[in-house]
């Protein structure tokens, strides 16, 4: 569904991503694991259109989307849940969800119901300013907001960052549930253990290069991965 | 008594004119974290356009034209002088704003030959009316009403419409706003257009009272409106409006104090003394954001 070929991205004067190729098949959960600074976030930012790739092509369902601006990427069905959640703190929960559907002009009723069913907590708090939510609730809101654009692919940047283990488990359960309902997921994580457990396909990224690939299970039991990322 | 009423009325009117300019400063700051130094000069250009356009067409065409052309001018200033510097350090954008300010002043000098130009009399606005025995121009009475209507309209726009929601989102977080599909350049343009429309309305009211337009006339009202925006808490629209009324009223009251006291020459100094006091005791202003500046 999403095909990345030989992607190179410069970031702050250095080559952060040095020619990687990734395949994200429809309805799968694909994960990209790696240490801090390996180029994971930069890869997602390039797909989302926030940074322009230096080389390589990105195709979505056969269409070349390399270098398009973020609004065109969103309207083609790719959304990014950014690292650190980045909800709009002064906007209410409901406004945050509505702004996720900014490019749509049709009725949002069904989608709001969908998101509220996935996250009943958000419904209870729909009139509250998003800044007053707990970290876990903000993560739910960031995911809900992304779903409001009705994405084909949802990219997630470190959804477990800074959350309590129990909350992290809840978030990963929801990721699986969303995937079951037909949304393809591209997930990057430092929490390799959790990510590999849910992933159909996994890639290991080291200083801008892919070093390993396999199913989530294979990498979970791979000695090198265990040593480097699972502790 | 009549004297006090006339001073208060004129204070409210001056405050309202500052408010219309101050909103432009505060909105642009809210979104771009930029003090748009050219804003006072856009106000001056709106005044000149009022003079030149009313000379060649009837007022009911000229006035809307002034507003539209001012908005177009602000749009092009943003596109030409600020947009290319979107990822540059904030200081560069500020210097660009100062450059635009002088460009507008110099062009005005070139076009007018540095002669003070007389603003047309607008029937209705310039007519006088008796309020509690005090002769007052209609413009003085109309100003606070017009400010109230425009502020309410603006508040509705910002809080209830999609573009308003986008403006609030962009002012908090450029990048995440982009991820929502918001075209930030469009939102920024809208902000400049709104600010300049209000400044154009302000120029019509202001020059109806003061009547002479010179190339540097935008500087002082611009600066005072800027102080009003800082006083109210820069980035906050209600703050800017309240700050502008306070400054307008205080300034007029000082000017109106008995001439034996000989303090009226200090009315401008008062405005800036107020700025210093605010910055010392409440740097975020009356309604300013508590959070630290975004990096």
Image: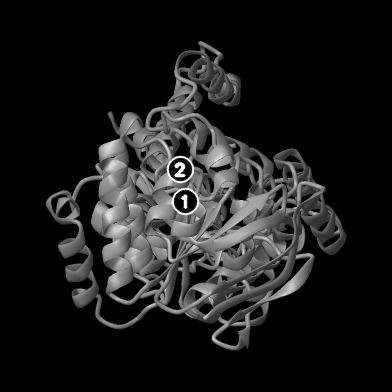
Residue A220 numbered mark, or none: 1
- 1 or 2: mark nearer the eye: 1
A115 sits to left or right of B189: left
Marked residue nearer the N-terminal end (1 or 2): 2
Q: Which residue is mark 2?
A: A191
In the orientation shown, which residue stands out farthest toward the top?
B261
Q: Residue at x 48, y 28 (%)?
A: B251
Q: Chain of mark 2?
A: A
The secondary element bearing badge 1 is classed as helix
Does the rendering let one see residue A23?
Answer: yes
Q: Is residue B201 visible?
A: no
**What is the total number of numbered labels drawn onto the structure image?**
2
The tag on residue B85 is none
Task: Give the left or right position of residue A10, taking residue A28 as reference.
Answer: right
Q: Residue at x 83, y 64 (%)?
A: B111
Closer to the camera, B93 or B126?
B93
- Return the x and y of residue A77 as percentages of the image width and height: 46, 77
Snapshot quadrant of residue A8: bottom right
Front residue of B166/B247: it is B166
Secondary structure under badge 2?
loop
Q: Residue B56: horizontal and vertical position, in percent? A: 67, 81
Mark 2 surroundings within 10 Å by alpha-carbon count, few (fewer than 14), some (14 through 19), many (20 or more) = some
Considering only vertical position in the picture, is A217 above or below B66?
above
* Residue at 61%, 77% in the rendered image: A3
Would residue B64 be found to the left or right of residue A35 on screen? left
Residue A203: horizontal and vertical position, in percent?
A: 58, 59
Query: Chain letter of disc 1?
Result: A
Residue B65 x/y as whole percent: 58, 76
């Amino acid at each position: 569904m999403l095909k990345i070929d030989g992607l190179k991205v410069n970031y702050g004067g250095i080559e952060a991503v040095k020619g990687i190729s990734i395949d994200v098949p429809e309805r799968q959960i694909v994960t990209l694991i790696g240490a801090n600074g390996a180029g994971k976030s930069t890869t997602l930012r390039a797909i989302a259109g926030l940074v322009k790739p230096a080389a390589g092509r990105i195709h979505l369902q056969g269409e070349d989307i390399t270098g398009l601006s973020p609004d065109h990427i969103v309207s083609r069905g790719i959304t990014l849940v950014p690292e650190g959640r980045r909800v709009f703190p002064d906007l209410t929960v409901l406004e945050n969800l509505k702004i996720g559907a900014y490019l749509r002009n049709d009725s949002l009723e069904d989608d709001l119901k969908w998101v509220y069913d996935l996250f009943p907590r958000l419904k209870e708090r729909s009139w509250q300013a998003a800044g007053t939510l707990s970290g876990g609730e903000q993560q739910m809101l960031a995911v809900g907001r992304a779903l409001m654009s009705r994405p084909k692919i949802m990219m997630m940047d470190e959804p477990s960052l800074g959350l309590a283990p129990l909350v992290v488990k809840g978030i990963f359960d929801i990721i699986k549930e969303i995937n079951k309902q037909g949304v393809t997921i591209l997930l990057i994580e430092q929490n390799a253990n959790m990510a590999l457990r849910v992933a159909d396909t996994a890639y290991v990224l080291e200083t801008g290069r892919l070093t390993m690939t396999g199913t989530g299970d294979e990498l979970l039991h791979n000695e090198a991965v265990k040593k480097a990322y699972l502790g | 008594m009549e004297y006090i009423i006339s001073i208060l009325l004129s204070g409210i009117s001056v405050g309202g004119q500052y408010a219309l300019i101050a909103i432009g400063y505060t909105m642009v700051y809210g979104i771009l974290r930029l003090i748009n130094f050219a804003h006072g000069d856009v106000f001056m250009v709106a005044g000149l356009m009022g003079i030149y356009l009313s000379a060649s067409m009837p007022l009911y065409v000229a006035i809307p034209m002034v507003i539209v052309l001012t908005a177009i001018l602000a749009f092009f200033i943003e596109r030409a002088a600020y947009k290319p510097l979107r990822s540059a350090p904030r200081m560069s954008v500020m210097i660009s704003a100062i450059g635009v300010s002088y460009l507008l002043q110099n062009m005005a000098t070139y076009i007018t030959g540095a002669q003070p130009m007389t603003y047309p009399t607008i029937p209705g606005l310039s007519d006088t009316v008796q309020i509690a025995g005090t002769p007052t121009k209609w413009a003085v009475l109309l100003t606070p009403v017009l400010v109230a209507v425009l502020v309410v309209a603006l508040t509705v726009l910002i809080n209830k419409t999609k573009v308003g929601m986008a403006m609030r989102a962009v002012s908090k977080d450029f990048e995440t706003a982009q991820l929502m599909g918001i075209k930030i350049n469009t939102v920024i343009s809208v902000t400049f257009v709104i600010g300049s429309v209000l400044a154009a309305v302000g120029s019509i009211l202001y020059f109806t009272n003061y009547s002479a337009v010179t190339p540097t006339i935008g500087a002082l009202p611009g600066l005072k409106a800027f102080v009003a925006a800082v006083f109210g808490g820069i980035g906050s629209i209600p703050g800017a409006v309240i700050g502008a009324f306070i400054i307008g009223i205080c300034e007029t009251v000082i000017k109106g104090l008995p001439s034996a006291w000989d303090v009226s020459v200090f009315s401008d100094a008062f405005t800036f003394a107020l700025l210093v006091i605010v910055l010392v005791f409440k740097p975020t202003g009356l309604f300013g954001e508590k959070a630290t500046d975004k990096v």
